[in-house]
Image (tube, grey):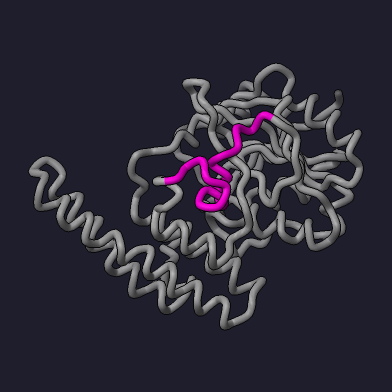
Amino acid sequence: MDFEVIVIDNASTDGSAGMINKEFPQVVLIGNSQNRGFAAANNQGMAIAKGRYVLLLNSDTIVLDQAIDKVVDFANSHLKTGIVGCRVLNPDMTLQPTCFMFPSLVNLLLSSTYLYKIFPHSKFFGRERMWWWDRNDIREVDVVTGCFMLVRREAIEQVGLMDEQFFMYGEETDWCYRFKQAGWKIMFTPDAEIIHLGGASSKRMRPEMLMQLRASILLFLRKHRSMAYYSAACLLVSIFFLLRVPYWTFHSLASHTTRHADWQTATAYLVAGFRAILGYRALRFRRN
């Protein structure tokens, strides 16, 4: 299979750009002077890519057993498919549950209450992230995760590139939604597998990251739903953060080792709860 490799370096400081130039001169390298975000960086690569398909692949992934060939074969046999995702594993080879539903008021309510953790195998309570699905069969989905997305060039030319308003999180959700609106299918195949090193779920997501994630959800709803729907979503996101304040407050009082960090988390969630009422712009943190 003929292919080209394009690397977008978002202002890294670890010497990786120099290593690529030295050890992989055949790679097309674009170096940014600042971190432009996931969407903008991928758009840079797609703008110069020449292939019939474009594969968005995170740098912290390991491709297993000809996974790229397998998804290309899948796309070749499913001509109405715009985007194909594959099975993603953690470094310990356990399943990383990629693919999820589009944001909605119901999904925001369920994630706010954590009922999906109490009933993880419920198709209703676990609907947003499809926790009940073992990712062992081919099916059409709403969204595949951006760490590995095979995208048909023909579909990109119709739908356009990623929306660069989404700096981190939400860009693939918005893109998949636009593909679906244009009549393209978003498909998942379990035949191809990769390992995603940085995607293993952590026990505790940093408040800043969680704020950015919720801001991206609100941006998606502001873009694709009515103002009344968006306003209701802002309220639910506010509830999401405020419900977590008592937990982290009591946790800070009960734990001597993590008291300072827990108190900072409680404070951050309190601030985020009030900011959410003001909308997605108030929740986003500054770009570096």
| Residue 246 in the figure: left or right of residue 17 | left
Q: Is residue 132 magenta?
A: yes
Name the residue located 85 percent from the left edge and 41 percent from the top edge.
50
Asked if residue 225 is positioned above or below residue 109 in the image, the reply reads below
Asked if residue 269 is positioned above or below residue 155 in the image, the reply reads below
- What number of labels is visible? 0
SS majority, magenta: loop
Name the residue located 82 percent from the left edge and 47 percent from the top edge.
82
Name the residue located 66 percent from the left edge and 24 percent from the top edge.
24
Splitting the image into 4 quarters, where does residue 227 fall?
A: bottom right
Q: Is residue 40 visible?
A: no
Splitting the image into 4 quarters, where does residue 58 fall?
A: top right
Q: 158 or 132: which is nearer to us? A: 132
- Give the x, y percent position of residue 197: 50, 29
- Give the x, y percent position of residue 242: 31, 66
Asked if residue 17 is positioned above or below residue 113 in the image, the reply reads above
Q: Can residue 191 be seen in this view?
A: yes
| Residue 12 in the figure: left or right of residue 59 | left
Q: Residue reaching furthest top?
A: 65
- Which part of the image, by quadrant, shows the C terminus? bottom left
- Give the x, y percent position of residue 143: 67, 49
Q: Does the magenta stretch include residue 16?
A: no
Asked if residue 4 is positioned above or below residue 258 in the image, the reply reads above
Residue range of the region highlighted in magenta in the rendering: 119-136
| Residue 280 in the figure: left or right of residue 100 | left
Q: Residue reaching furthest bottom?
A: 228
